[in-house]
Image (cartoon, helix red, strand yellow):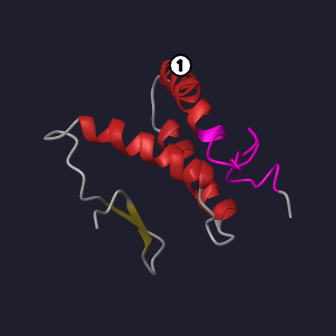
Amino acid sequence: MKKILEVLECSNGELKFNTDVDVIKDPESVIDITGRAIFCMATKLWGGNEHSVIAMIRALFSADMALSPDRKTVCKGIAEESKVLYEIFQKSLSQCGKVQTFPPGFGPNMKGRKN
């Protein structure tokens, strides 16, 4: 088993990040992990924790963007990349049966949450 991303909160509130992935040695691993993440996030049953997992992923993304001096360029690049990935995976995902999606406002503030 390989640790893609581990985020732990210490008792003092500090967050500790860790991964077994070395993107310097294996830059292609990002593409591979992204593809598998799309498939798993869209098709697997997560045991009911998908709302919390997606909220935390989006919270981490928001924190990353808060530290970016050029958010507009970063967001544009991510939007373009995710559009291409959406188009590539849409057909294969729809053939898998039920596809789980999350609305744009769904994130750290829990807008769009369906109970």
The rendered magenta stretch, by its main secondary structure, is classed as loop
* Residue 36 covered by magenta stretch: no
Q: Residue placed farthest to the right in the image?
A: 115
- Looking at the image, residue 39 sits to the left or right of residue 113; the answer is left
Q: Determine the residue positioned at 65% across, 68% down.
A: 49
Q: Is the residue 11 above or below the residue 48 in the image? A: below
Categorize mark 1 by other alpha carbons within 10 Å: few (<14), some (14-19), many (20+).
few
- Looking at the image, residue 82 sits to the left or right of residue 51; the answer is left
- Looking at the image, residue 30 sits to the left or right of residue 90; the answer is left
Q: Is the residue 83 above or below the residue 63 in the image? A: above
Image x and y of residue 50, in percent: 65, 62
> Range of the magenta residues?
93-113
Residue under numbered circle 1:
80
Residue 32 vs residue 110, the one in the foreground: 32
Residue type indicated by callout 1 = Glu
Q: Quadrant of the C terminus?
A: bottom right
The kind of secondary structure element at disc 1 is helix
Q: Residue placed farthest to the bottom in the image?
A: 11
Q: Determine the residue positioned at 42% across, 76% down.
A: 10
Q: Determine the residue positioned at 22% across, 41% down.
A: 23
Image x and y of residue 60, in percent: 52, 50
Q: Is the residue 30 above or below the residue 114 in the image? A: above
Residue 85 vs residue 72, the one in the foreground: 85
Q: Determine the residue positioned at 43% across, 40% down.
A: 35
Residue 89 sits in which quadrant?
top right
Residue 67 vs residue 115, the one in the foreground: 115
Image x and y of residue 52, in percent: 65, 64
